[in-house]
Image (cartoon, helix red, strand yellow):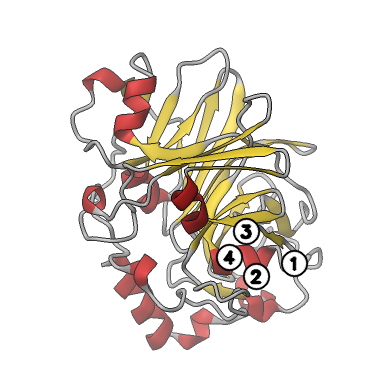
Amino acid sequence: MLKRLLLSAAVLFPWAAQAGPGEWKREWPKTDFNQSLISDWRQIRSGGVPKDGIPALDRPEFGAAAKERRLQPREPVITLEIEGAKPRAYPLRYLTWHEIVNDEVAGVPVAVTYCPLCNSAVTFDRRTRAGVLSFGVTGKLRYSDMVMYDRETQSWWQQALGTGIVGEMSGQRLASLPSWVESWEEFKARNPDGVVMAQPAYNRRYGHNPYQGYDSSEWPFLYDGAPPPHGMAPLDRVVRAGNRAWPLARLATTGEIREAGLVLSWKPGQASALDTGALARGRDIGSVRVRDTSGLDVPHDVMFAFAFHAFWPDGIWMLK
């Protein structure tokens, strides 16, 4: 499994797990390490794979949802609905292995991202002051979260935040777009005319979970930050909207929460992508939508509690 390979790499090659700009310059000659938000370079660690060792996808092909036969009903997909285009589903059976999809929807350049180690699925607008960027995977982790890079300036970006952290684009923020993770069955039922990303032309075990049992772990992979407060387990899921986090268990108990000008809803039927070896057979964690009081979808993320605490240390915990 990929998880075992990453763990082995970190143990066998400790020099690769923690390094700094002096070593990285050989692989990243065009990255300006003099511009950075990082105060301690030990925060950034190798995940055991090199630059582009996890290959991002560009300009994916799509097929009619009604004709899709690979996906199982409970499989999770990232749903993106932008006016002027058919609703699109990006299956986690592919994103688990590729982590970034550079796409364009109704004229909007987007990056659909997923970090399995933080369970963070966020969609960004790729337009910036430096032009339209395209993203790849550095192979680095910060607080166990994927560090992306843009191919145009070779700057590094924190996936959970959408913020440039190293290089020319340090301090720049990508705009988040409303997207959500739901079951394939839910997507099809709501969008009979929708489209789904086609299987990439890579030799991967699509539909297999390389992080088997990860979301039942006691501690995140290569995470050296503080545990979350309030008795939360590090890998408990929370619903993040802005700088607030609602425990998923609380939302699942009530089915709906109306707080802070938002309406959070939950319903069963989605398999965890990080549980069993067969992605479609994971335990039911349910699907979440977050809308404002007028019914418009709001950018949000269903991530692990440790990641929320790491990147929003002063965040607000909506516990009751």
Tell me which amino acid carries mark 1. Phe
Tell me which amino acid carries mark 3. Lys
- Is 129 in front, or is 305? 305
Q: Disc 3 or disc 2, which is closer to the eye? A: 3
Q: Disc 3 or disc 1, which is closer to the eye? A: 3
Residue tagged 4: 307
- For numbered disc 4, what is the local secondary structure? helix
Vertical position of residue 42 compared to residue 266: above or below = below
Q: Residues within 10 Å of mark 2 (few under 14, many from 20)?
A: few
Q: Residues within 10 Å of mark 3 (few under 14, many from 20)?
A: few
User: In the shown orientation, is residue 171 left or right of residue 100?
Assistant: right
Q: Do the residues bearing badges 1 and 2 touch, measured as CB atoms within 8 Å? A: yes
User: In the shown orientation, is residue 20 left or right of residue 73?
Assistant: right
Which badge, 3 or 1, comes first in the chain's sequence? Answer: 1
Q: Residues within 10 Å of mark 4 (few under 14, many from 20)?
A: many
Query: Residue 135: image x %, image y %?
Result: 57, 45
Residue 33's tag is: 1
Q: Is residue 41 visible?
A: yes
Residue tagged 2: 25
- For numbered disc 1, what is the local secondary structure? loop
Distance from label 4 to label 1 (Cα)?
24 Å
Vertical position of residue 42 compared to residue 277: above or below = below
Residue tagged 3: 320
Which badge, 4 or 1, comes first in the chain's sequence? Answer: 1
